[in-house]
Image (tube, helix red, strand yellow):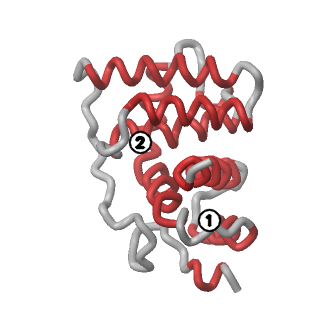
Amino acid sequence: MGNRRKSRELAMQALFYMDMSPNDSNEILKNFCSNFTPPRKMLPFFLKLVNGVIQGKGEIDSILERFSDNWKLSRMSCVDRNTMRVAVYELLYCHDIPYKVSINEAIDVGKKFGTKESGAFINGILDSIRMALENKEIIVKNHIQKNQTGEKNGHNIPDFDDARK
């Protein structure tokens, strides 16, 4: 399994952990990372995903609600919801990653951590989003900050040197 897959899995787990908390503070992410420290090779992509989802959460959630017929985000399993948040972030903002790669990775993460129905559920919603993006039916409104790869002065990036102590 590659570093990007592991980064996606850890990002979903961090977002899951943050979903269970009453707020999205740096302290919650820092606490997660002090208990489940991402290896140095995975850290830049992990941080890009987690911080990108945090920054774009409003837009990402709006898109997920739009394409998940008869499902509110609050009714989705936390694994499915956060797996799709990571994938939608990639679809919207990671132009170096082909749509199909992001979708297939999300399906695999959903199957590993979710229910037996997770793969099909995730695939259906993400494929609808992919088609809408290809048909220019989704306009990306939010502009995610560029500094997401671990620099300590970035938005929502905890000091991981402290978290490792």
Counting residues from the start of the chain, the first of labels 1 and 2 encountered is 1
The x, y position of residue 136, in whole percent, is 23, 23
In percent of width and height, residue 40 lies at 56, 72
Asked whether the residues under the numbered discs 1 and 2 touch, taking CB atoms below 8 Å apart as contact, a structural biologist would say: no
Residue at 62% from the left image edge and 65% from the top image edge: 29
Q: Which of 100 and 47 is in front in this view?
A: 100
135 relative position to 57: left or right: left
Q: Residues within 10 Å of mark 1 (few under 14, many from 20)?
A: many
Instruction: Give the answer, above or below, for where 149 lies relative to 56.
Output: below
In front: 101, or 142?
A: 101
In the depicted structure, whether residue 15 falls above or below residue 163 = above
Q: Mark 1 points at which residue?
A: 29
Q: Mark 2 points at which residue?
A: 90
Kindly state the secondary structure of the residue where label 1 is placed: helix
The Cα atoms of the two marked residues, 1 and 2, are separated by: 20 Å
Image-quadrant location for residue 60: top left
> Helix or strand or loop: what does disc 2 sit on?
helix
In front: 156, or 94? 94
**In this picture, is 139 found above or below 160?**
above
Q: Which of 26 and 147 is in front in this view?
A: 147
Q: Position of residue 113 (x, y in %)?
A: 74, 37
| Horizontal side of residue 139 vs 18, given as left or right | left
Residue sitting at the far front: 1
Residue 31 against residue 145 in the figure, above or below: below
Q: Which amino acid does label 2 sit on?
A: Glu
